[in-house]
Image (cartoon, rainbow, N blue to C red):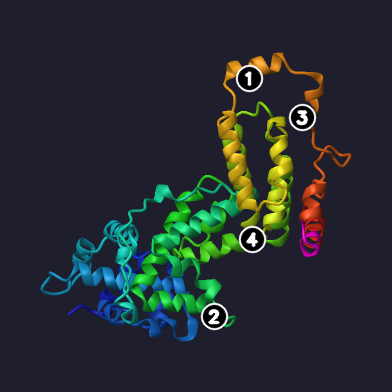
Amino acid sequence: MATRAANRAIATYLFQTAGLDEATINIVIGGLKIDTPKRILSITSEQLLTGEKITVGNAVNILRLQRFINLTLQDVSGPPSSLEEWKEKITSAAFDEFETTRIVAEPSTPANMPVSRTHATETKLPTINIKVGDYPSFTGRHDDWYSFKAKFSALSRLHGNKAVIDFFDNADPTETAVLHGKKRLSDTDYDTRVRSVFAILEIRTSDGTAASLVTKHAASQDGALAWRSLREYYDQDGNRDVYEIRCRLELSQLRLEYNSPGGFNRYHDTFFRLVKQIEECGTTLSDREKRAYFVGGIKDRDYASLKDSCEKDSFNETIVRFSRKATELGKMSGPTRRQNNKVTRNIKPSQASSRPSTPRTNGSGENNLSRLPAAVWQQMTPEARRGFIEASRKAKEVS
């Protein structure tokens, strides 16, 4: 039988294998009395969290070590008896490989999600293979945040990680990171998904300033906390207002000229991209506003008669009619280079006014964020106008 000192040496080695630092190991062995391999294999989450002597992240690592040892020794007649034998069976490299396999393989598709007993008769989701490379990357630019957030959230939910990224949204005010940590300890599947989300975020933010917000949770491999850190930093009212005003300004300056590259298709796609970006900020544009933006930006005189005749059409009807007109004119994809050069040579002075104008500035060379076309302003509701003015004010304060 191993002596007390030998058991403590084995426990110390095992905790080092799991990545615990010296101070935490001293607390676990000396304070919590988890000083033998047998006690490591029998410890529970409640015992680890009693008195909150160690962090939730370290508690999670100890329970992972417990699972790893059980899996490694399941085909062995008995546990090793000496430190040397433990070192042969349990290594840091094997533990790291075990954790990497669990992170990548277990939450691979929605089909791997546990099925609720109360919904067992529901139609199962089809198996969908999602790779890490399918997730968008994020360098930390504030203007890219809302697009990244929408795409990452959608893919995470499809990947089966909805519970992780939505945990702090759904939590009551009294629920804290400690309760989240307890869930990780009690729910193996949830813990695996938390680590999966962290691994994905760590990879997709590695090339920019946002990486620091993710890697500060590296010790606990906590994707839910990393996602919350990103949202707390980038989902600020000032940042959102600046982004929305810039998108509105870009939308108000969008033009479809007689010789615009890409023709109607590019104009149409750019328009709906900007609308989507504005609405990702939490603002819903009315159909009247969208129609005013869309029709107001079309400066090609070939569409002049249609602009006059579609004033009473709905937004969707307007889009369809302009699409048909573009097809009739052969301008869906814009003019060819030869056609473009010919038109440019034959341009008349009276057509010069239809070219894009230089955006007005506020005297300092910057775009005036609060200026919108009169046609758009007239279509906005009083509430939307007040909201836009307030957002413009906040945006100027931030910028």
Q: Earlier in the sequence, mark 3 or mark 1?
A: 1
Left or right, 7 with reference to 208: left
Q: Which residues are magenta?
A: 380-385
Task: Identify which residue is drawn at 36% across, 72% down.
Answer: 62
Label 3 sits on what residue type?
Answer: Ser
Which mark identifies residue 175? 2
Q: CA distance from mark 1 to mark 2?
A: 62 Å
> CB of mark 1 within 8 Å of CB of mark 2?
no
* Prevalent SS, magenta region: helix
Label 4 sits on what residue type?
Answer: Asp
Task: Identify which residue is drawn at 78% across, 24% down.
Answer: 351
Q: Residues within 10 Å of mark 4 (few under 14, many from 20)?
A: some
Q: Earlier in the sequence, mark 1 or mark 4?
A: 4
Q: Residues within 10 Å of mark 3 (few under 14, many from 20)?
A: some
> CB of mark 4 within 8 Å of CB of mark 3?
no
Q: Earlier in the sequence, mark 4 or mark 3?
A: 4
Q: Quadrant of the N terminus?
A: bottom left
Q: Is residue 381 magenta?
A: yes
- Which quarter of the picture shows residue 18? bottom left
Task: Identify which residue is drawn at 80% across, 59% down.
Answer: 385
**Residue beneath label 4, please?**
235
Image depth: mark 4 or mark 2 in front: 4
Left or right, 80 with reference to 327: left
- Which quarter of the picture shows residue 341? top right
SS label for mark 4: loop
**Residue beneath label 3, please?**
354
Q: CA distance from mark 3 to mark 1?
A: 15 Å
Q: CA distance from mark 1 to mark 4?
A: 43 Å
**Residue beneath label 1, please?**
340
